[in-house]
Image: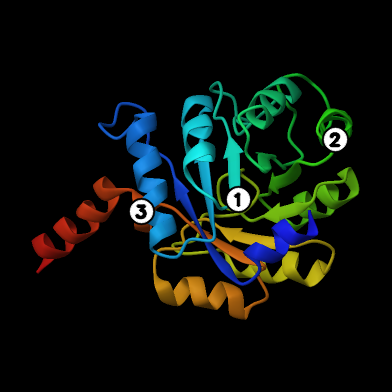
């Protein structure tokens, strides 16, 4: 576990996820994108969906953070213990789960979920996708291995900032308890570098690298405005 985390320290992790209904929503396509990201220097990959995870885990030689997005409730990132089991079985080294204090669909607490998960998969790390400092404190107490800022601005507890929520980044890093992966609206190399400067263990970038629809929209809007 220590060597895996060490391999990600001060490094870039690329999130390779397509949205429902998009042409790129295909395991082969997302695997190729993950391979391209590794070729460009990504030290890790974050991906969703069991088929994508199985394919990507066998195709890249860097750690994979896996998750599923299930249901339409507020808690949808690997929301249940069963979901976490399924993600772990794909071969990824880290399982990302909703790390907020909201009620989970299976009504287990975060601590119960982490404890039961680690009984079955003691060598798989758990990343808690948090939305606030209080989430992070609770996640540490629950026994997770990694704290992520993924849900800052999306859980209803904090306003959604235009870029990364630097205030919550600083708060969670200041806990000094666990590695912090900064994720969420990191759209420029300067922002990625700033995350590391502020003490992040690693930085996760998705949309700005792997989502051509959004990137094209940014340029199209700029051209229209010009």
Tell me the tag on residue 118.
Answer: 2
Q: Residue at x 18, y 60 (%)?
A: 219
Q: Is residue 59 above or below residue 147?
A: above
Q: What mark, if any, has residue 28 been given in the picture?
A: none
The residue singled out by tag 1 in the image is: 63
Counting residues from the start of the chain, the first of labels 1 and 2 encountered is 1
Image colouring: rainbow
As rendered, which of 121 and 14 lies closer to the eye?
121
Which residue is depicted at the point 53% across and 22% down? Answer: 72
Mark 3: few/some/many CA within 10 Å (<14, 14-19, 20+): some
Dot 2: what SS?
helix
Q: Residues within 10 Å of mark 1 (few under 14, many from 20)?
A: many
Q: Which residue is mark 3?
A: 36
Q: Is residue 23 above or below residue 36?
A: above
Q: CB under 8 Å between callouts 1 and 3?
A: no
SS at mark 3 in the image: helix
Question: Is 42 located above or below residue 51 in the figure?
Answer: below
- Rendering coords of residue 103 (x, y %): 75, 28
How far is mark 2 from mark 3, CA to CA?
32 Å
Q: Which of 43 and 196 lies nearest the eye of the viewer?
A: 43
In the picture as drawn, the residue positioned furthest to the bottom comes out as 197
Q: CA distance from mark 1 to mark 2?
A: 18 Å
Between circles 1 and 2, the one closer to the viewer is: 1
- In the rendered image, residue 122, in percent from the top left (x then y), is placed at 84, 38
Residue 207, image x, y percentages: 38, 52
Label whose residue precedes the other's in the sequence (2 or 3): 3
Marks 1 and 2 in Cβ contact (< 8 Å): no
- Residue 177 occupies quadrant: bottom right
**Where residue 145 appears, x then y in whole percent?**
79, 51
Which of label 2 and label 3 is nearer to you? 3
**Which type of secondary structure does the marked residue at label 1 adopt?**
loop
Depth order, front residue of 82/58: 58
């Amino acid at each position: 576990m220590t060597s895996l985390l060490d391999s990600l320290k001060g490094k870039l992790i690329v999130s390779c996820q397509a949205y429902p209904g998009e042409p790129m929503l295909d395991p082969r396509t997302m695997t190729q994108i993950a391979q391209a990201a590794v070729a460009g220097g990504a030290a890790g990959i974050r991906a969703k969906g069991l088929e994508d995870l199985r394919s990507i885990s066998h195709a890249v030689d860097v750690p994979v953070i896996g998750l599923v997005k299930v249901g339409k409730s507020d808690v949808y990132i690997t929301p249940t213990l069963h979901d976490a089991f399924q993600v772990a079985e794909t071969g990824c080294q880290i399982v990302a789960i909703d790390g907020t204090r909201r009620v989970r669909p299976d009504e287990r607490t975060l601590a119960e979920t982490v404890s039961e998960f680690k009984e079955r998969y003691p060598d798989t790390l758990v990343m808690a996708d948090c939305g606030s400092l209080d989430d992070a404190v609770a996640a540490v107490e629950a026994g997770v291995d990694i704290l992520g800022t993924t849900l800052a601005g999306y859980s209803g507890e904090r306003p959604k900032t235009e870029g990364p929520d630097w205030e919550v980044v600083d708060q969670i890093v200041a806990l000094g308890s666990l590695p912090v992966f900064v994720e969420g609206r990191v759209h420029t190399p300067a922002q990625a570098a700033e995350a590391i400067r502020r003490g992040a263990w690693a930085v996760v970038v998705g949309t700005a690298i792997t989502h051509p629809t959004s990137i094209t929209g940014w340029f199209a809007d700029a051209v229209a405005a010009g």
